[in-house]
Amino acid sequence: MSNISSVSEFLLLAFADTRELQLLHFALFLGIYLAALLGNGLILSAIACHHRLHTPMYFFLLNLALLDMGCISTTLPKAMANALWDTRAISYQGCAAQLFLFVFLVVAEYCLLTIMAYDRYVAICKPLHYGSLLGSRACAQMAAAAWGSGFLTAVLHTANTFSLPLCRGNAVDQFFCEIPHILKLSCSEAYLRKVGALLFSLTLTFGCFIFIVMSYVQIFRAVLRMPSEQGWHKAFSTCLPHLAVVSLFVTTVLFTYLKSPSISSPSLDMVMAVLYSVVPPVLNPLVYSMRNQELKEALWKLMSRCVAGE
């Protein structure tokens, strides 16, 4: 990272120009941030404290809650601090760390969502083999693979992005350090390196997406063959929330990174970034708990204990 002397800090995109709107955005995002921490924290506690939830599906959901808490904590606190103190600055090292952590957590979450699709496929299409295919060791290995994939991808993209010389100013058109907006500041074409990193990401993205789609095709075929409505309801109650989370995540990420430059604007980029970096950590606890009776019961028991002071 030899270009650290040329750029010592970056200027992030502000949520608003006036002081009143900055404070309003601070209050709004503080509420969103606390809601995400509370929702995911409750899911973590419910799964950890109730032995009935010590199953592969809830083990992966616990990992998802951890990733969601990390993802939203990587972007929002700095943006809120900048809005509160009326500044836009983030240090070079802070920007590199933020980009690394964000890519790490987002990729790990996407890989974990793929694994969760496989979990639902085995549970519905191969229920007799569920215990053997998704034992505790297999689940730990798959979760470790998701986290490891995120780490390796983050190393690749962070090294590739910050090894390029930056000579087009230091203003980042986003409220956090995001790869496309850092690359816009580069004065080096480095075409092959950019294309190589893009191809790697697209291969991972579409590979996981195709696996998820194929899993759900098999799941829906199996569900439609079920004789009872109760079986339909149980299958859909665990599959539809996951499918909704995946759909929001994939569509917003793909639109953000593959959209034409001609339709790009700071306001549109900010909205899309909020949709895939802020909204999922807030909605995931609601989506997974609304249609899951076991999780709802565990959450009610947990909150009852807290209120009773046990």
Image (cartoon, grey):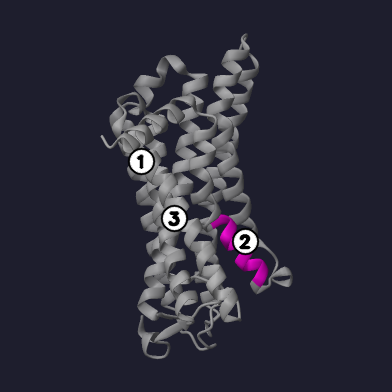
Q: Earlier in the sequence, mark 1 or mark 3?
A: 3
Most extreme residue toward the front is: 308
Q: Which mark is residue 272?
A: 2
Frontmost residue, 87 versus 258: 87
**Residue at (62% x, 29% y) in the render:** 217
Magenta segment: 267-276
Chief SS of the magenta region = helix
Q: Which mark is residue 4?
A: none
The nearer-to-camera label among 3 and 2 is 3
- Compute the Cα span from label 3 to label 2: 21 Å
Whole-percent x and y of residue 218?
59, 25
Q: Look at the numbered disc 2 and give the secondary structure of its residue.
A: helix
The nearer-to-camera label among 1 and 3 is 3
Count of marks placed on residues: 3
- The amino acid type found where label 3 is placed reads Leu
User: Where the C terminus falls, by quadrant?
Assistant: top left
**Residue at (32% x, 38% y) in the render:** 306
- Compute the Cα span from label 1 to label 3: 15 Å
